[in-house]
Image (cartoon, grey):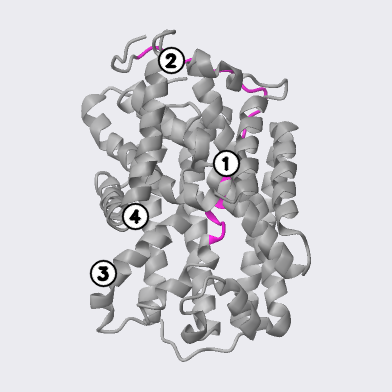
Amino acid sequence: MTLTATSTDAPRRTPSPASVTATTATAIAVADMIGIGVFTSLGFQVQTIQSGFSLIMLWVVGGIVALCGALSYAELGAAFQRSGGEYNFLARLYHPAIGFMAGWLSATVGFAAPIALAAMAFGSYFNGAIPGAPALILSLGITWLIALVHLSGINHSSVFHNATTILKVVLIVAFITLGLTFGTAQPLSFTPSASDFSIITGAPFAISLVFVMYAYSGWNASTYIIGEMHDPKRSVPRSLITATLIVLVLYVALNAVFLYTTPMTAMAGKIDIALIAGTHIFGDAGGRIVSGLICVGLISALSAMTWIGSRVTMVMGEDLAVLRIFATKTQKGVPAAAIWLQLAIVTVLLLTQSFEDVLNFTLFSLTLSSFVTVLGVIIARYTMPDLERPYRTWGYPLTPIVFLSVTGFMMYYLMVEKPVQSLAGLGVMFAGLVIYWISSKFETPAKHKKDA
């Protein structure tokens, strides 16, 4: 196998016995986005920004940037109808080796580290709701329980995931409603003032936007399961765009409630913003109420990452003989070996408590993968003019340019502030390139086409 340019032959693909609807795909993206980021970021933002309007605009701008990314990915997902996310897109747009580098990162730690972090947060918040509960055992237990649900079949996974995501959204809407109804208004204005323009164009706003974008990460979730989706030409764009808009509204409303009900001085520099706001709204029982809300929300987030992360490994197994075991599916269409591998990595990270370090050095590489993917939308318009595009990016070329500009700044910021971790993340990707090169000596490369 030689590292040649991408071919137009169809890749291997194992059909699934069940189809994922656009509703389920939307629920996966919503659940993947709404983790702990929105409940923890505001405390750092109010340290440098005290304008209510500018703080809300952070979440509006972040949502718009995420929407620009979703609109761009929607074009690729409708054209390249195969699971795998960036692994699939980059292999088609550039070269199979480039796709493998992104896929290797996702298959090893790109999803495992966030799953471990969310599981540990679940244990901690459960302990807050019910003092004395064993946090580590709860973290391991919820991770294994969700994995077993997904191993039971796609139909069971869909029902479980849709139910937990709907419950999450209902609880968040209830929290927003109750906060506006019973919370004590703070002396803070959300109308723009003359100073807001200078704030929005300043460095503190730009730096805070980096952390807001991490809270929005997951907007591309449904592109990892395209091969399991019903009518992907329509379902992929619908799920990406709808999910991002839903989360944008929820994020803006949540942060407005936090600011409306809680003094900035009480939130400044704190991580547990939701708990602090809950105490101000509901009194002493507020912390337990919010802890329970976050626990429920983390269940669907863990479910989303468990589902989509294993599909990257599955698709890579379809293309490379050395990973072929991970492509095998059960009679119910589940890539069991891929799920077990991901679960094993998460378990090790939880037991060794090393997931935060792993997460830190994957941030730059994951951002780079999405940057190069959206850049591919522009490149493909010139290099693949005859490609069938059932959906074309709305607002092109402005939408991809907006996304590229913001993510480009994020990568610059990460490289300046965390050079060692950023370079380590690149090292993981290049390790994938070495593995791809070694495997290329023993097999013929899988080939890619617009239709899977």
Q: Could you tell me how far apart the alpha carbons at marks 4 and 1 are, in whole angstroms? A: 34 Å
Stretch of the chain drawn in magenta: 8-36
Q: Name the residue at 69% across, 78% down.
A: 286
Q: Does the magenta stretch include residue 185?
A: no
Give whichever of discs 2 and 1 has the lower sequence position.
Answer: 1
Give whichever of discs 4 and 3 has the lower sequence position.
Answer: 3
Q: Position of residue 40 (x, y in %)?
A: 52, 67
Give whichever of discs 3 and 1 has the lower sequence position.
Answer: 1
Give whichever of discs 2 and 3 has the lower sequence position.
Answer: 3
Q: Where is residue 439 in the image (x, y as percent from the top left)?
A: 43, 15
Element type at mark 1? helix
Amino acid type assigned to the residue bearing label 4 in the image: Lys
Nearer the camera: disc 3 or disc 1 = 3
Amino acid type assigned to the residue bearing label 1 in the image: Ala
Q: Which residue does the numbered mark 4 point to in the structure image?
A: 418
Residues at marks 3 and 1 touching, judged by CB atoms closer than 8 Å: no
Q: Which residue does the numbered mark 2 point to in the structure image?
A: 439
